[in-house]
Image (spheres, grey):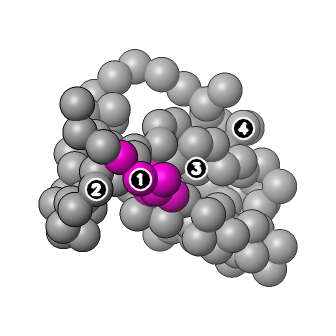
Amino acid sequence: MAETMESPGGVYALCCRKSGTRLLCATVDMQKARQWFLVCQEEGRCPKRELEKEWTAYGPSAFAFEIVERVPKKQGQEPEAYRQGIETLKEFLAMQPFGCG
């Protein structure tokens, strides 16, 4: 079994609680992504272009940041391989039927 190190990466969703829209996103730094979302929410700026219409219609408070899956980085794994693995997982999860929780 491969040894792993703590990693902040993974897949998260930006969810509109009013419409049920769920945008999956991939990141190698979950904490940074969450902080960016909170700053955008506080300042009223939409964090992702794909959500602009609903962000404007329902307002920042209608949105939530949800961690879908954390991805541990394997020891010695190259950054690009790690990033690509997270992107692949996001694409797989996007094909799965689930909404905002």
Residue closest to the eye, 78 or 13? 78
Residue ID for mark 2: 75
Q: Amino acid at mark 3?
A: Leu
Residue ID for mark 4: 17
Q: Height in image: 5 above or below 99?
A: below
Inspect the magenta stretch and tell me whether residue 48 lies in it.
no
Q: Position of residue 22 (x, y in %)?
A: 52, 40
Q: Is residue 61 left or right of residue 65?
A: right
Can I make out residue 23 in this image?
no
Q: Earlier in the sequence, mark 1 or mark 2?
A: 1
Can I make out residue 73 in this image?
yes
Residue ID for mark 1: 5
Within 10 Å of disc 4 (Cα), the crowding (few <14, some 14-19, many 20+) is some
**Secondary structure category for the residue under label 1:** strand
Nearer to us of marks 2 and 3 is 2
Q: Residue at x 41, y 53 (%)?
A: 5
**Secondary structure category for the residue under label 4:** loop
Q: Residue at x 34, y 53 (%)?
A: 73
User: Cβ–Cβ below 8 Å for labels 1 and 2?
Assistant: yes
Mark 4 and mark 2: Cα distance apart in space: 38 Å
Q: Position of residue 66 (x, y in %)?
A: 63, 43
Mark 2 and mark 3: Cα distance apart in space: 29 Å
**Secondary structure category for the residue under label 2:** loop
